[in-house]
Image (cartoon, rainbow, N blue to C red):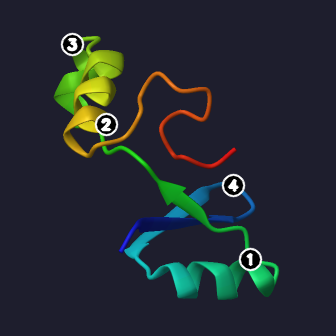
Amino acid sequence: MPLATIEIRGKSSRWGINWHASDTEIEAMRADGIDVGVIENVIPAWVADLGLTRPFIVVQDLWNFKLPFSKTGGSGDA
């Protein structure tokens, strides 16, 4: 189950709701007109603070058997 996200925009703030959704749920929500994103990588704050975000993503993608240097960013979708 991928980690999915929906962004809700209020008058002064943006709110993100993240949950583990099945591919069927994501496609059904998209068919209904809801913009659902899929979170590919989760980066801890300490990694970003040290400026190691890109190397961390490459290692995380390799660990998850993705292709981090492909034109699609490892998602496999064109």
Q: Which residue is mark 4?
A: 12
The quadrant of the image that shows the N terminus is bottom left
Measure the alpha-carbon separation of dots 1 and 3: 35 Å
Mark 3 vs mark 2, foreground winner is 2
Query: What kind of element bears circle 1?
Result: loop
Which of the labelled discs sits on residue 50, or is there none?
A: 3
Dot 2 falls on a residue whose secondary structure is helix
Along the polypeptide, which appears first: circle 4 or circle 3?
4
Q: Residue 47 in the image: x percent, y percent?
A: 21, 24
Foreground residue among 34 and 73? 73
What residue would you read off at disc 2? 61
Instruction: Tell me the SS state at disc 3.
Output: loop
Of tags 4 and 3, which is closer to the observer?
Answer: 3
Select label 4 or label 2 by which is in front: 2
| Residue type pointed to by label 3 | Leu
Q: How many numbered marks does the figure carry?
A: 4
Label 1 or label 3, whichever lies nearer to me, is 1
Amino acid type assigned to the residue bearing label 4 in the image: Ser
Based on the displayed image, in which of its 4 quarters is residue 52 positioned? Answer: top left
**Closer to us: mark 1 or mark 2?**
2
Residue at position x 32%, y 29% in the image: 57
Residue 35: x %, y % from top left: 72, 68
Q: Quadrant of residue 36?
A: bottom right
2 relative to 37 in the view: left or right: left
Whether pointer 1 and pointer 3 mark residues with C-beta atoms closer than 8 Å, the reply is: no
Residue placed farthest to the top in the image?
51
Give the distance between the C-alpha atoms of the residues marked 4 and 1, in whole angstroms.
21 Å
